[in-house]
Image (cartoon, grey):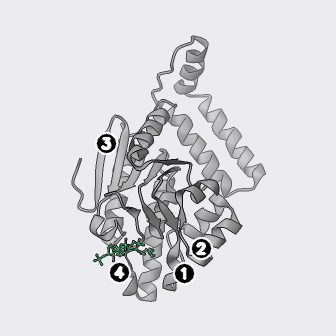
C-alpha cells in the first residue's frame, strides 16, 4: 500500500485498489483528493500488470459523501466552472481507461461520490449504501457528469427524479432501477469486488478494452454508426494472438492463457 495522503493505492495480482481516504470528512472530494485520485488512476493506467481497478472509500460509513462543501461554498463562478471541468476530466479518464473498474460502494455515495461510481464500469453496493445527487438542495446541480451518466444508465425519468428531488435512495432501490449491479452484506463487499475483478482478469484484456470502447463510444453515436464501430473492433480483435488463443483453448477443452497481444 503506498501512502497517498488522500487516496491509497495498492496493486496486487493484476488488481489496483484505490481507496479514497478522508474518513473524518466521509471521504469528501476536495481539490487535493481529486488531484491524487487523478494521479492514482494514471498509475493504474500505466501499469501493464494492472488489468482491473476497484474504487472504494475508507471506513464503513461512506464511499464518498460528495464534493467538499467547504470548498464549494467559497467558489466564484470562474472557479466553479474550472472545478466542474477538472472533476469531469478526471472521471472521463477513469471511464475511458481501457480497463474495467468496479465501484465498491461501502456507504454514502452522494453527489460527486455517486458521480465517481457512475464513471466506473460496474457498481457493487453494500446493504447500508445510500446513493443520491443532493446538489439541488445546495442550490447547484451535479457537475462531475452526473446529469449525463445517470440518465444514460437508468433513463431520463429516473435520473430526473433523483436529480430534481435530491433525495437519496437505498441499495435495494438502486439495484431495482439498475444503478448498481449487485448488493452485498458489508463484510462481503470487497471480497465480491475482488472475485469479480479476478473473473474479469481471466478474460482477454484486448477483448475487454474493445468491448468497453464499443459500448462507450457507441452510446455517443447513432445505432448505424455504432454497428460500424462494433464491426471494425470485431475485425481488429480477429488479428490478435488472444483471439487465436481463446478459440483454440475452447476447441482443446482447456482454459485460455491471454497475453494481451
Ligand atoms: N463536504 C465536506 N464535508 C463533509 C461532506 C461534504 N460533502 N460530507 C460530510 N462532511 C463532513 C461533515 O461536515 C462532518 O464534518 P465535521 O465532523 O467536521 O462537522 C463529517 O463529514 C461527518 O459528517 P456528518 O454530517 O456529521 O455525518 P452524518 O452521519 O450526520 O451525516 C451525511 C452523513 C452524508 C448525510 C451528511 O454528512 C451529508 O449530508 N453530507 C453532505 C452530502 C452532500 O450534500 N453531498 C453533495 C455535495 S455536492
- Report how far apart the C-alphas of labels 3 and 2 lie in the structure: 35 Å
How far across and down, in percent of the image, does residue 125 sit? 48, 53
Task: Provide the secondary structure element on which disc 4 rests.
Answer: helix
Give the Cα distance between marks 1 and 2.
Answer: 7 Å
Query: Disc 3, disc 1: CB below 8 Å?
Result: no
Rendering quarter of residue 136: bottom right
> Going 47% across and 80% down the picture, which residue do you hit?
81
**Which of pointers 4 and 1 indicates the residue nearer the eye?**
1
Asked if residue 225 lies left or right of residue 53, the reply is right
Q: Is mark 4 within 8 Å of ligand 1?
A: yes
Q: CA distance from mark 2 to mark 4?
A: 21 Å
The answer to whether marks 1 and 2 mark residues whose Cβ atoms lie closer than 8 Å is yes
Label located before the other in sequence (3 or 1): 3
Looking at the image, which residue sits at the far right?
224
Residue annotated with mark 1 = 136
Of labels 2 and 4, earlier in sequence is 4
Which residue lies under the disc numbered 4?
Answer: 71
Crowd rating for badge 2 (residues with CA inside 10 Å; few <14, some 14–19, many 20+): many
Percent x, y of residue 228: 73, 45
As drawn, the label of residue 160 is none
Amino acid at each position: 500500500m503506498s501512502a497517498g495522503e488522500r487516496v491509497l493505492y495498492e496493486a496486487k495480482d493484476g488488481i489496483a485498489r484505490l481507496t479514497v481516504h478522508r474518513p473524518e470528512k466521509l471521504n469528501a472530494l476536495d481539490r487535493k483528493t481529486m488531484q491524487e485520485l487523478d494521479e492514482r488512476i494514471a498509475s493504474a493506467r500505466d501499469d501493464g500488470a494492472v488489468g482491473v481497478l476497484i474504487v472504494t472509500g475508507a471506513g464503513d460509513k461512506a464511499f464518498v459523501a460528495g464534493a467538499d462543501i467547504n470548498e464549494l461554498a467559497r467558489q466564484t463562478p470562474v472557479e466553479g466552472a474550472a472545478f466542474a471541468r477538472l472533476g469531469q476530466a478526471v472521471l472521463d479518464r477513469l471511464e475511458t481507461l481501457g480497463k474495467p473498474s468496479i465501484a465498491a460502494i461501502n456507504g454514502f455515495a452522494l453527489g460527486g461520490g455517486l458521480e465517481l461510481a457512475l464513471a466506473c464500469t460496474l457498481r457493487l453496493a453494500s446493504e447500508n449504501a445510500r446513493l443520491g445527487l443532493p446538489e439541488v438542495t445546495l442550490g447547484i446541480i451535479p457537475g462531475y457528469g452526473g446529469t449525463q451518466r445517470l440518465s444514460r444508465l437508468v433513463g431520463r425519468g429516473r435520473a430526473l427524479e433523483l436529480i430534481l428531488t435530491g433525495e437519496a435512495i437505498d441499495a435495494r432501490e438502486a439495484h431495482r432501477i439498475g444503478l448498481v449491479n449487485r448488493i452485498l452484506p458489508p463484510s462481503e463487499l470487497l471480497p465480491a469486488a475482488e472475485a469479480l475483478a479476478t473473473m474479469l482478469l481471466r478474460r482477454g484484456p484486448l477483448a475487454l478494452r474493445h468491448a468497453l470502447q464499443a459500448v462507450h463510444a457507441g452510446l455517443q453515436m447513432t445505432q448505424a454508426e455504432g454497428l460500424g464501430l462494433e464491426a471494425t473492433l470485431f475485425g481488429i480483435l480477429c488479428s490478435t494472438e488472444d483471439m487465436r488463443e481463446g478459440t483454440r483453448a475452447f476447441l482443446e477443452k482447456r482454459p485460455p492463457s491471454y497475453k494481451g497481444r
